[in-house]
Image: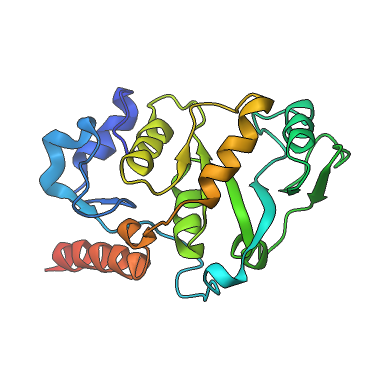
Amino acid sequence: WQKSKDPPQARPYDAADRRVAPWPDGRPLAPSLAAVARKVAAVGGISRFDGRASGGAGARTDGSVLLLGGGGSSPVTAEQLAAAASITPTATWSMLGAGGDGGRIAGVRALPWTDDPWPLLSTAGVVVAWAGQNSVADLAAADARAIVIPQPRPFGEQDATAAALDDDGLAVVVPQWPEAAEWPGLLDAALALDVDWARWQVPGAAARAAAVIAGVAMAGLS
């Protein structure tokens, strides 16, 4: 959703008639979009879980902590995750997408990738996630209490998303993986959140995006 500073990538961006942004309508756009704001259609966060019942607060297990995308190229190490689990002994930690460490992390239940993470996502007491647009939209769909950590990106898109979440009080946001001693306070802060994820405008977002695309296609045929 953020304009590239790389000229070859910027050409199709500049030539587009419309730009679909998985971003809440009414929220300030990234500064790089200011010059083309009239062409941007902010449709809300797009999640494949839109419309699935989360079960609400009563379905959550307050002592459970779910880390999304913990394996593969995750910036968190096994040692960091084990330290977080060790200092929060009343919490039950799970890592969805266990990768290179073989799932052998002390105090952490390693879970493989699954085609349907919804049951885990919608019942976790706290979800720890990165600040990618897909992850945030899924958090919103699940009405999750979350700790969000932006990963470094060339154009700072995750930092911008995390800042928006922080401004609206939608998640506990930290700039990088916390030190072990910070985790008890962060989990307490996340559990205390009273979040209005409706602000992320997930319901109907995919349909709104499709309508924008269809409108451009129809205009091209006329």
Q: On the picture, is 211 further left or further right than 172? A: left
x then y, percent, for residue 19: 24, 49
- Tell me what residue is drawn at x 69 percent, y 41 percent: 70
Q: On the picture, is 18 further left or further right than 91? A: left
Instruction: State whether residue 117 appears in this view.
Output: yes
- Tell me what residue is drawn at x 51 percent, y 75 percent: 52
Query: In the rendered image, which quarter contains the C terminus?
Result: bottom left
Q: Vertically, is 132 above or below 191?
A: above
Which of these two is toward me, 130 or 165?
165
Query: In the rendered image, which quarter contains the N terminus?
Result: top left
Instruction: State whether residue 129 appears in this view.
Output: no
Which of these two is toward me, 204 or 129?
129
Q: Vertically, is 86 above or below 118?
A: above
- Tell me what residue is drawn at x 48 percent, y 62 percent: 143
x then y, percent, for residue 7: 29, 24
Q: Quadrant of residue 128?
A: top right
Q: Quadrant of residue 63?
A: bottom right
- Tell me what residue is drawn at x 68 percent, y 64 percent: 115
Q: On the picture, is 36 further left or further right than 98? A: left
Which of these two is toward me, 52 or 59?
59
x then y, percent, for residue 193: 46, 52
Which of these two is toward me, 90 or 102?
90
